[in-house]
Amino acid sequence: MLEKIKLSKRINVTTTGSVYEEIRRRILNLELPPGTRLKDTVLAKDFGISNTPVREALRRLEADSLVETKPYIGTYVKELSTDEVKDLYEVRETLEVMAVRKAVEQASEQEINEILDIANKYLSLVNIGTVENYLKYDRMFHEKIAAASGNVFLYELLHSLGDRIHIVRRLDLEDHFSGIEHLDIANAILKRNTVEATRIIRTHIQDHLSRVEKLLEANSRSPK
């Protein structure tokens, strides 16, 4: 599949770190969609470098659960099954509800204003912004709440799931844009209303999961 993807321009990458970041960017933007085979020789030729930094970058991406190596077959962009998405979102919901609850309890006025600013920026992008900017502010919003929780381990756990959540969000954003729930969550935090804030974040995540499940089921029924 990789050989058929036409890349618009060559990116200047020379080190394992820069190769890693570029392949990661392409995976997150679905330029390399789930299921794409990643041949180190093809990628090395595309980047104009040797195979070694590409192989090292692919190992890092595998450690991040963004790619997987199938013995005697090859390395592929990881595909998430419906069950894996459900598991991911079960963990996400638990962590985000905890983050919102703790942010309501102890976020500073400055942190709440920053959450509100991001929510308003996010809402302003609906239907006029690029998908990349939309997703950037979506991730910023959720991570800002986690940071405002004051629990560094909670923040790190959510941050570590960020790339996988980003890919699932990207699939959904092909057909669905919404921003009002972020503003509702931010306002509930501003009012220190734990019940309302946790109710909205649960609904927000569960509704998204429901849409993604339908997309995955529809894709599984589509002719290959």
Image: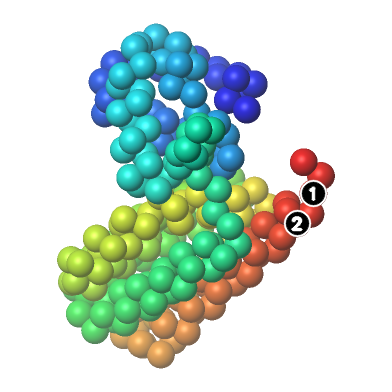
Residue 130, by quadrant, is top right
Seen in the image, is 217 located left or right of residue 200?
A: right
Across and down, in percent, residue 168 comes to: 53, 54
Residue 107, by quadrant, is bottom left
Residue 32, by quadrant, is top right
Q: Residue at x 34, y 12 (%)?
A: 50
Across and down, in percent, residue 136 comes to: 42, 48
Q: Which mark is residue 5?
A: none
Q: Is residue 209 above or below residue 173?
A: below
Residue for badge 1: 222
Across and down, in percent, residue 162 comes to: 38, 54
Q: Is residue 23 above or below residue 11?
A: below
* Mark 2 secondary-structure assignment: helix
Question: Which quarter of the figure is the N terminus placed in?
Answer: top right
Question: Which quarter of the figure is the C terminus placed in?
Answer: top right
Mark 1 in CB contact with mark 2 (< 8 angstroms)? yes
